[in-house]
Amino acid sequence: MTYPSAPEPDPPRQPAPPPYQPYEPYPPQPPVSGQPPVSGPPGQPQYAAPYSENPYGQPNPYGQPAQNPYGQPVQGAYGQPLQPQTTNGFAIASLIFGILGGILFGVVFGIVALVQIPKRNQKGKGMAVTGLVLSVAWLLVCGAGLAIGALSSDDDSTNGPSSLLPSLPSATKELKVGDCINGLLALDLDKELRRNPPAVSCAEPHEGEVFRVVKVTGTSFPGTTEIENQAEAGCSGEALSAYAPDDKTQDLSIYYLYPTSSSWTFGDRDITCLVVNEKDKLTGSLRR
């Protein structure tokens, strides 16, 4: 008689793995260059100091720009290197022309530089302003020089108190009433010749004729204004009418020669009144 064998027992069940891996300490790490290790609990491995500084040994405090360890320029927007400020060329040119007296170029270049500098973020504003100031200073100096030259020219040239009485500075040669003269209107001749026209024969073509001589009295020079007042009164139209008929002198002009401060010291005291034809030469005397 056969009996059934007993059933085999089930194999032992393995315990389920824990839900989390047990903690295993990290292996010891070598200390960072220049940093001492941090001591842990007794019997525990050593660990490096916290990584609080950059790997190049340079601190990077908050608010300071990052240091580039390779000496490359700091990058700007979109990775482009920041370019250093350049000096505006027009500002330099304005300063140079301002120093040399190139007024027009100094002003134009200075204005162009002041417009370009803020737009291009350039340097040179001070040079542009200096160039403009120097150019304006040159302009004022030149203007003053021209004004002084014009005044000096007026003193040496024909100068009349009115359109009917143009005047010339002194005649150091004595001219008498009735003398005829040439050289008074020749502007291309020497000024001394015009101041001291020579007497010529009235029968020859001539420019003018002396119709009166007025003596200036006094021991000291009375001044140009006073002499001109005496000349205007002495060389009047009435005096000319007394010398020559009006029909012969109606198209003629009255001039006079008077002493200056320099000729006064040489004894010049005469105001010489002249009747002059400014268009054509005269022939013969105008005296009545």
Image (spheres, rainbow, N blue to C red):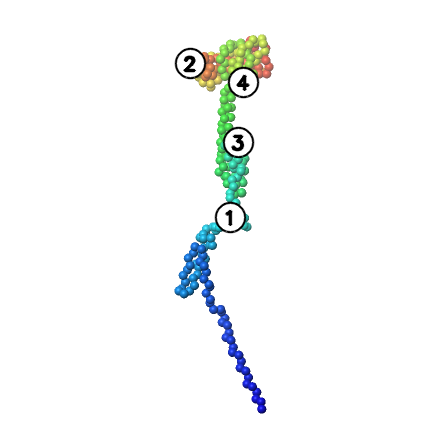
CB under 8 Å between callouts 1 and 4? no
Q: Which residue is mark 3?
A: 102
Q: CA distance from mark 3 to mark 2?
A: 52 Å
Q: What's the residue type where badge 3 is placed?
A: Gly
CB under 8 Å between callouts 3 and 1? no
Between label 4 and label 2, give the one nearer the viewer. Answer: 2
Dot 3 lies on which element? Answer: loop
Q: CA distance from mark 3 to mark 4?
A: 44 Å
CB under 8 Å between callouts 4 and 2? no
Q: Earlier in the sequence, mark 3 or mark 2?
A: 3
**Mark identifier at residue 164:** 4
Dot 1 lies on which element? Answer: loop
Between label 3 and label 2, give the one nearer the viewer. Answer: 3
Quarter of the figure that contains the N terminus: bottom right
Q: Residues within 10 Å of mark 4 (few under 14, many from 20)?
A: some
Which quarter of the picture shows residue 283? top right
At x 57% / y 13%, what residue is drawn? 207
Dot 2 lies on which element? Answer: loop
Q: Is residue 261 something that shows in the picture?
A: yes
